[in-house]
Amino acid sequence: MGPDDEIDHAGPVPPYRQLAAILAARIKRGDWHPDRAIPSEAQLVGTYGLARATVRRAIALLVEQDVVYVVPQRGTFVRGR
Amino acid sequence: MGPDDEIDHAGPVPPYRQLAAILAARIKRGDWHPDRAIPSEAQLVGTYGLARATVRRAIALLVEQDVVYVVPQRGTFVRGR
DNA sequence: ATACATTTGTCCGTATGTATA
DNA sequence: CTATACATACGGACAAATGTA
């Protein structure tokens, strides 16, 4: 995961944007591949110590940016080219 | 059977839909002929490494699509033209 | 007539994951 | 953060009908 993947709750950037940036970077880095699921919301909550609502905001941002797509009852998947 | 006939449990498409697509393709390809039985649920469980409930969902989908028909205690048969 | 194997039908419980309030 | 709902998947068990030995 890396030491730079921590949320700074005191900084000017909202946690949901930090998480979105982190996840986008990890995808770009190849941590998860196209059409493969990223960790569940619950897992991200545990990993980054955020509220679920925050995780969902971050994912919504990534969906907007077409970085991932959500499949109901299945998970959140990396958008393939 | 082909190397593309494997179930991807991590992908966005539910396994039961993947199996339905695989079986429909195999029927179209002529692996099994009209009014002939396709493999039993138990065999499909073994072949594709799925739970029986999942196999049954896939078959239910094919019945809906009129690709096959089920005869209780006899098997599942390819719908003839 | 009996026994056995096969196949579908049905129901139970457990687990995971997302959706919504 | 909690609770509920829904969809999906797995595993097991038993019943009912059929076909065969």
Image: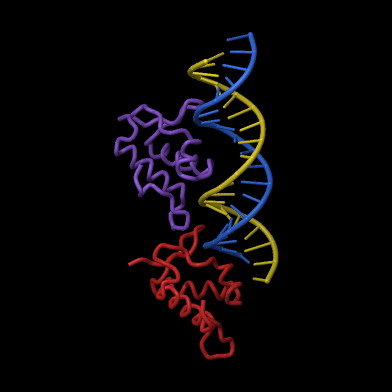
Chain colours: A red, B purple, C blue, D yellow
Q: Which residue sits at x=43%, y=33%?
A: B39
Q: How many marks?
A: 0
| Residue at image location 41% in from the left, 72% down from the top | A30
Q: Looking at the image, is A41 positioned above or below residue B15? A: below
Q: Nearer the viewer, residue A46 or B64?
A: A46
Q: Position of residue A16 (x, y in %)?
A: 52, 79
Q: x, y percentage for residue A55?
A: 54, 73
Q: Residue at x 38, y 47 (%)?
A: B5
Q: Is residue A71 above or below residue A30?
A: above
Position of residue C3 relative to residue B71, above or below, is above
Q: Write the residue at 33% across / 37% down.
A: B27
Q: Please say if A48 is above or below A40.
A: below
Of the 4 image quadrants, the one containing the C terminus of chain A is: bottom left
Q: Which residue is more in the foreground, A1 or A20?
A: A1
The percent position of residue B41, horizontal first and vertical second, equals 49, 36
Residue D10 point in image, percent of width and height: 56, 47
